[in-house]
Amino acid sequence: MTEKAKATIEAGKAVLGIEFGSTRIKAVLIDEANRSIAQGSHEWENQLVNGLWTYSLEAIWFGLQDCYRDLRANVQSQYGCDITSLAAIGISAMMHGYMPFDAKGEMLAPFRTWRNTNTGEAAATLSKLFNYNIPLRWSISHLYQCILDGEPHVKDVAFLTTLAGYIHWQLTGEKVIGIGDGSGMIPVDPVTKNYCADMVEKFDKLIADKNYDWKLGDILPKVLVAGENAGVLSEEGAKKLDISGSLKPGIPLCPPEGDAGTGMVATNAVKQRTGNVSAGTSSFSMIVIEKELSKPYEMIDMVTTPDGSLVAMVHCNNCTSDLNAWVGLFREYTELMGVPVDMGRIFSVLYNNALTGDADCGGLMAYNYFSGEPITGLQEGRPLFVRNIGDRFNLANFMRANISAAVAVLKIGNDILFNDEKIKVDRITGHGGLFKTPGVGQRILAAALNSPISVMETAGEGGAWGMALLAGYLVNNKNERNLADYLEVDVFDGNTGTSIAPTKEDVEGFNAYIENYKACLPIEKAAVLYKK
């Protein structure tokens, strides 16, 4: 395996996927059999600047370059060679947000990430105008909110894109975007595989009195679907990615995609009636549906797969951050006791102990809101743990309550799909940090959604691997299959992972927990009103 991987790298046949996550930038190098053969990463954090969550351009480029440097070091350590060429590259990142540029390519305002919830007025107006749910974090919401707020830079916007679209543009010179990522800027039409023309026209009419020099269609990136060529790595782009100068230009790039799309690919969930749940810093479920929903729902976003199929997305701003903070507290305790500590061991012990707790968490209640949570009507968040004197307060119930909190909002949104819209799904696959301890997050999510949940061994590879698969699809799809068939046959070879079905006791317990969760939301809302 080592010699074969080395030969693949030296021949320039390896494929690279890079994904900008909320807390980590990750690079995955795959071989011609779609196996991960090298990895690199860079840890980073967003910053709250002037009330808005952002990452600086300096942090973005240093992070990308350090991640790629780490990948090269991993290749050199494992195989004793360097990366000089690649078969293909794919760039992915957190979806949505706001990155505006002027005609000279200069950034007009700091990058506003998906995490910002200051766009309420804009999102509400556009949702009504389009008769379509437009979430707070979508690029069009950020743009219109800037217009409503009278921000002077808007008149100079010549190009608006996402983080993935920006990196791709800088590496290739091409102002394009994958359809999945584009569908998180403004709705796309699954028939035309382009932005919804009527919505673009309505937006232009809405802002006509501003007399800007631009029209919406002029400033958005061109939409591409999976498998389309999205340009090649330029000389300047090669230098930006690999500051050592070893990487040669001319490498083809696939359309840049959002983290939702790469999650679907990494879990083989791009076919209709399949779905996946990504559970990390934030969480979201993606169910590939067979037809439009009967009406718009504020809790459900309509996006697409990387090849343009319609997807019902339930996005939650908060997932494992508060859970990780509690586990960190237990780590501090063990260190104070002078006990040798391994973080993986602490997670394993605490998570597995949670399964011994009561199915309804003993009445204990947790809110994991580091930031606002639109689905439950909160523009800000306060992490909160609540219990009554009669509740069964023990460690197992405490941990189960916090793990359940990580998927509680996800359940609230998906209940609409399964109970009200009667959406059918054949397979839901989970991936992300919540599932690293085998069987625990999987079982609790199965109870929450009342559906079997599969987890694959490859799920730990995450979105960067999914992005590498999309880049591989561009150059290795010799049989010219559609994306769903390519993944099913050429990548996963029929593997659907290990499945856990919900038990009646767990489902009833989670239903009781979620009713308490809803009933106690006024406590969380009151906590948000408190200012230090």
Image: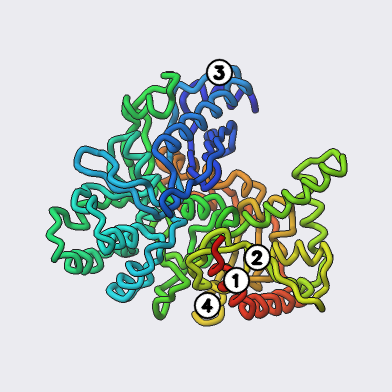
Residue drawn where x is 48% and y is 66% of the image: 379
Closer to viewer: mark 3 or mark 2: 2
Q: Residue at x 23, y 64 (%)?
A: 200
Kindly identify the amino acid type of the residue bearing the numbered disc 2.
Leu
Quadrant for residue 473, please give it: top left
Residue type at mark 4 is Ile
Q: Position of residue 31 (x, y in %)?
A: 54, 33
In the image, 8 versus 153, the foreground residue is 153
Q: Secondary structure at mark 3?
A: loop
Q: Which mark is residue 416?
A: 4
Residue 384's disc number: 2
Kind of element beneath mark 4: helix
Locate the C terminus by quadrant: bottom right
Q: Nearer the viewer, residue 93 or 102?
A: 102
Q: Earlier in the sequence, mark 2 or mark 4?
A: 2
Give the label, 1 or 4, closer to the camera. Answer: 1
